[in-house]
Each structure stands twice: as C-alpha cells, then as structure tokens.
Image (cartoon, rainbow, N blue to C red):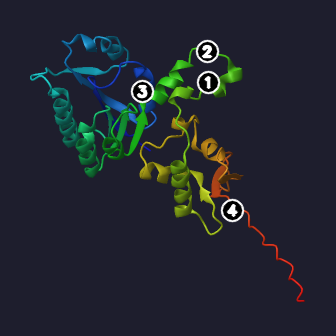
Amino acid sequence: MMESRLAVLIDGDNIPSTHVKEMMEEIAKYGNPTLKRIYGDWTKPNLSKWKKVLLENAINPVQQYSYTVGKNATDSAMIIDAMDILYSQKVDGFCLVSSDSDFTRLATRLREAGMKVYGIGEKKTPNPFIVACDKFIYIEILKSGADDSDDDDEENSEEKKRPSSKNVDKITRKEIKLISTTISDIADDDGWAFMGDVGSLLQKKQPNFDARNYGFQKLTPLIGSINNFEVEQRENTKGSRHKLIYVRIKEKPKTTRTSRPKSKQP
C-alpha cells in the first residue's frame, strides 16, 4: 500500500518553534511529508528562533511581508498556497500547523475535495478549526514526550511516556459518555465492540480525542482505567500473534428487592 503524501503548512506567526522535531515525527505517523513550508515575515526578530530548526528539518521558509498593521498576510499566503497544492494533485492530504481559527474554512474546503486534513496546534485553538480537521493533535502532548527523552532509565520508561501533570486533562463524565455511546453504536448483540473500530469512530466524532491528552499512550489503557468499561483480549483467528482487543460497557449490578413481611391482621 502506497504511503500518503502530505503537504505540511506551518503558520510561523502562530506556532512556537520549540519541539519541531517531535512535531515532524508525529506527522510521519500519518504519511510522508513530501512538501514542508513555513510562512512568516522573516525580517521580524520574533521568527529568528525558527531559522536553525528549518535547516535541521528541511522546512522551506516562505517570506510574507506584513503590508498592513493588524492584518495577518501570512494566513492569506498559506491559504493561497494550499489551494495551489490541492489543484496540483501532488499530495493526498494536508497537515495545517496553527492555532488560528482563520484556517477553519480552508480545512473544510480541503476535506470537501477529498483530502485528509490533520491539524496541529496549542490547546488554545478554537473548536471550529479543530472539528474542521479529520484529526487534531495538541502540541503540548508532543512537548511532554520530548521533555523526558534525554533520560535513559528504563525502569521508569512507562511513566516517562506520560505527559507531565500540568498538560494532562482529567477524564470527565463528558468523555465517559462519549466513549459509552461510541461503544453502543458499534457493539454486537453481546455488547462487545472491537477497540480499533471504537478508536476510529471516536476520532470521527471528536477529532481532538487523543489518549495522550489524558496521560495514556494508547486508547486501550485509557478505557481500561475507567470502571465503567471492561476490556477483553481475544486470540486472532487469522494466525497473527497480535491479540484482538474488545471492550463493552459494564452491566450495572441488579438490585434485589426484599419483600416486607406481611403484618398479621388483629
């Protein structure tokens, strides 16, 4: 199967330059970033931190002067380039790196054209842009993984994979309800749903749903940590050594009513 070709377009005015390496590694999970561009006014000193990482990650800078104070010319340049790339038919998807809601319509238009759209931005990203993407990844969870990468102590390797507590969201009733309804949507007659299908549907319902947001590397341990669900491993009938993971909603224990003794009639 041919790997998807991705166009990576970065809003240099809106994204910090730290941990770009981790960001590019994340993008590589979804396809081959064959085209990488970053947009900004490179005459401004605030973009100077980007210059070193551009060479290290083979990202091409695109100069866009700020013609008018208060107007973001970078957004316009990035949108025009995205449409040119779309019509060139040289890529299968886009990765839009920004926390700016101005790219909401662009993401929607690219998906209408049959493109896969991945978004990367900070947690402050407005929801309209997030839901306009097929998948949205927060930069904060990528930063967290990078912070622990220099320590080689294998004993605590699993803990180090988890984001620091300041970047971890708490699992609320809202997330539990989302998981429950998703399991119910695709469960068989016995209530079991294949974990892979659950993950895919969760992504469609909520593009920024990611186990790493809650301190887990994968969906299975996240769901397994919630008492409302039970997880089961099954042997793969196709001969693969990888076991199949299924999940279902736990049944509520039935309460038995105790009958009161009838009072004797006088």
Q: Indicate left or right for 230 with 107 as reference.
A: right
CA distance for labels 3 and 2: 20 Å
Residue highlighted by disc 4:
251
Which of the two marks, 3 or 4, is nearer to us in this view? Answer: 4
Among numbered discs 3 and 1, the one appearing first in the sequence: 3
Against 132, residue 41 (above or below) is: above
x then y, percent, for residue 102: 23, 37
Query: What amino acid type should be assigned to the residue bearing mark 2?
Result: Asp
x then y, percent, for residue 177: 53, 54
Which mark, by number, is residue 160? 1
x then y, percent, for residue 80: 16, 35
Which mark, by number, is residue 151? 2
Give the quarter of the image for residue 264: bottom right
Residue highlighted by disc 3:
23
Among numbered discs 3 and 4, the one appearing first in the sequence: 3
Query: What amino acid type should be assigned to the residue bearing mark 3?
Result: Met
CA distance for labels 3 and 4: 41 Å
Residue at (25% x, 38% y) in the render: 103
Q: Residue furthest left?
A: 67
CA distance for labels 4 and 1: 34 Å
Q: Contact, CB < 8 Å: mark 1 with mark 2?
A: yes
Which of the two marks, 4 or 1, is nearer to us in this view? Answer: 4
